[in-house]
Image (cartoon, rainbow, N blue to C red):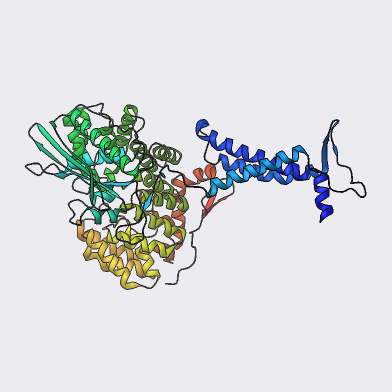
């Protein structure tokens, strides 16, 4: 051992190691100081440390093999016989001192007192002692109560609250509960501490609005739910103008951020709400239309369209009015069907373009264009538009939901599940997203997870595309549950009298196409007194019905088990995928796992779980 240590010292290996340690430590310190000033990415210091670690054994090998002389670097000669320890020189003592200083400073940094600067998102224990962590820098904005004499201004209170919420989401380090999650507690008697626990936030903003004639009163307060303490409150009495509404919203947001910053010992960031329209009628019509959009159904969509159209007529330069109009145009056909002489897809695109010209930073118009492009089977543009929406507002659950829908329709189920999950992380109460996540999981082969999500959706009154999930219960021989969900869906669509026919369709695969055709044509004739417009639901399907993605991708799709028409169904499925231009997109951007190219111009697709399900 003594001879080895002596040889290491003779070859200057210890000197090089000590010098490498000191210089490496200095480089790490310089990098950490320079990163903020030079706007370097967070992983820069990790990269420097990794490179230094890789370089250490190389430096040791070079130190062993070579030495510096006045004539340059040369190979180290073998030690002479009987060579002993070389006495320490001045350079040795300097290196030892440097190493000790590095060790002392590093030890102080590691074991010394913690920094007094507050962490960006401190965590507190939940008041109910459940152990679930609550981010201290977190907040929810509840809908402002309507105290107007006629009680008809709920839309206005919602709009005030949403404007404030949208500003707070732009504050770095502040977790803000989504609109959908917070607004479900409208008028709830739980009490603010309980609501805060449900939303997993520390702070709550609540308030009220009262419009009477030409005057406006808005009250707002900020409450720390941990102890139900008031941190700030104020009342604003102003003449009723659009400028005053935006000014009050700006003041409230600024005061809330200032109060939060003081409570959390943070530097208050600058926040502001721009006056987007000076036309009070345009703003009120926009808020009415937005309220309908959030609660849209078969009956109120036409009224919502009317409100948004009147808003942009009142102020043609109101960007968010055009964005709202684009959004409601974009979903209109799904609610109203094709029994209309308006091309809602084209109208949605035009309105979205107008909104973007007026305000390129708005994310919603890009999401609307991605929806329209998807329906037009323009896949490259659909992804480009949805990516642009996320880039402009990554906190928007809507932006992630819309892109997830593009992934799902295009057959990329892993990516769809990731985007739907991201949307739910931003808005856990966005229930239709949970239903579409169930479809993505089903097509990935994760049947148990898909059923769990589907059942949550039933509790949330979601019933879109339920026919995709009902065959799963039949395949698992759970006919009782399958029949329950079938009857549930039929009653929703006022079609309960036909439950028995649908039960046979889903469960009896020995029925021929002729028998199915007779059964459903009789139902259609009974309901319409004519067979005009009747289309047989079995066997073949066309691109007009391809938006029912279960037909294309569900491993439990009943038509693939109906022996009488299986081959016709598979051929139709292949043709529909081709007509959707998906193979062309896949060849340029990569095939999804369940599909593959065949030759230069053909393809084939399996189901993710392509087994013969035991019926």
Left or right of 517 in this view: 279: left
Q: Which of 330 and 63 is in front in this view?
A: 63
Q: Where is 47 relative to 317, above or below?
A: below
Locate residue 113, reporting x and y percent. 48, 47
Q: Which of 202 and 555 is in front in this view?
A: 202
Q: Where is 60 relative to 246, above or below?
A: below
Residue name at image x 89 percent, y 48 percent: 83
Locate residue 543, reporting x and y percent. 39, 49
Which of the 4 image quarters holds residue 271? top left
- Quadrant the N terminus occupies: bottom right
Seen as rendered, the residue at the extreme right is 81
- Quadrant the C terminus occupies: bottom left
Locate residue 51, reporting x and y percent. 65, 42
Locate residue 453, reporting x and y percent. 36, 60
Q: Which of 224 and 281 is in front in this view?
A: 224
Is residue 327 visible in the rendered structure shown here?
A: no
Is residue 367 visible in the rendered structure shown here?
A: yes
Residue name at image x 27 percent, y 29 percent: 274
- Count all numbered tags in the image, as a single digit: 0
Residue name at image x 46 percent, y 58 percent: 444
């Amino acid at each position: 051992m003594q001879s080895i240590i002596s040889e290491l010292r003779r070859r200057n290996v210890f000197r090089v190691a000590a010098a490498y340690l000191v210089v490496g430590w200095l480089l790490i310190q310089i990098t950490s100081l320079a990163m903020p000033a030079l706007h370097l990415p967070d992983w820069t210091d990790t990269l420097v440390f990794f490179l230094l670690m890789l370089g250490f054994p190389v430096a040791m090998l070079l130190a062993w093999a070579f030495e510096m002389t006045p004539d340059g670097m040369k190979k180290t000669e073998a030690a002479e016989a009987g060579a002993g320890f070389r006495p320490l020189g001045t350079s040795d003592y300097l290196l030892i001192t440097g190493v000790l200083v590095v060790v002392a400073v590093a030890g102080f940094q590691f074991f010394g007192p913690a920094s007094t600067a507050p962490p960006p998102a401190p965590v507190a224990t939940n008041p109910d002692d459940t152990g679930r962590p609550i981010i201290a820098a977190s907040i929810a904005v509840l809908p402002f109560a309507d105290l107007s004499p006629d009680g008809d201004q709920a839309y206005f209170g919602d709009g005030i609250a949403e404007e404030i919420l949208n500003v707070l989401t732009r504050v770095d380090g502040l977790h803000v509960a989504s609109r959908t999650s917070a607004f479900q507690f409208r008028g709830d008697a739980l009490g603010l501490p309980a609501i805060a626990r449900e939303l997993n936030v520390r702070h709550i903003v609540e308030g009220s609005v009262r419009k009477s004639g030409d005057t406006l009163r808005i009250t707002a307060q900020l409450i720390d739910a941990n102890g139900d303490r008031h941190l700030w409150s104020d009342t604003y009495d102003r003449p009723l103008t659009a400028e005053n509404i935006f000014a009050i919203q700006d003041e409230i947001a600024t005061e809330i951020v200032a109060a939060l910053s003081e409570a959390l010992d943070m530097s208050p960031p600058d926040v502001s709400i721009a006056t987007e329209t000076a036309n009070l009628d345009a703003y009120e019509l926009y808020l009415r239309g937005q309220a309908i959009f959030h609660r849209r159904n078969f009956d109120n969509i036409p009224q919502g369209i009317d409100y948004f159209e009147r808003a942009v007529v009142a102020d043609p330069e109101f960007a968010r009015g055009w964005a709202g109009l684009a959004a409601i145009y974009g979903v209109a056909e799904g609610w109203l069907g094709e029994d209309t002489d308006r091309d809602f897809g084209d109208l949605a695109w035009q309105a979205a373009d107008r909104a973007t010209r007026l305000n390129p930073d708005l994310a919603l118009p890009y999401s609307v264009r991605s929806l329209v492009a998807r329906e037009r089977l323009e896949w490259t543009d659909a992804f480009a538009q949805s990516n642009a929406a996320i880039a402009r507002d990554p906190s928007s659950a809507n932006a992630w939901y819309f892109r997830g829908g593009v992934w799902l329709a295009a057959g990329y189920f892993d990516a769809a599940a990731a985007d739907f999950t991201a949307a739910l992380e931003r808005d856990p109460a966005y229930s239709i997203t949970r239903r579409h996540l169930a479809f993505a999981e089903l097509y990935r082969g994760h049947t148990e997870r898909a059923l769990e999500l589907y059942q949550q959706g039933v509790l949330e009154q979601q019933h879109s595309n339920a026919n995709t999930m009902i065959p799963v219960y039949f395949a698992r021989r759970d006919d009782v549950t399958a029949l329950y969900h079938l009857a549930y869906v039929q009653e929703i669509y006022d079609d309960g009298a036909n439950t028995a026919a649908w039960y046979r369709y889903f469960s009896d695969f020995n029925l021929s196409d002729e028998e199915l055709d007779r059964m459903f044509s009789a139902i259609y004739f009974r309901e319409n007194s004519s067979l005009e417009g009747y289309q047989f639901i079995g066997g073949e399907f066309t691109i007009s019905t391809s938006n029912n993605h279960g037909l294309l991708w569900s491993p439990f799709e009943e038509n693939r088990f109906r022996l009488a028409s299986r081959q016709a169904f598979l051929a139709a499925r292949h043709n529909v995928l081709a007509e959707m231009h998906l193979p062309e997109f896949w060849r340029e951007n990569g095939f999804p796992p369940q599909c593959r190219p065949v030759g230069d111009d053909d393809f084939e697709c399996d189901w993710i779980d392509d087994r013969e399900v035991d019926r």
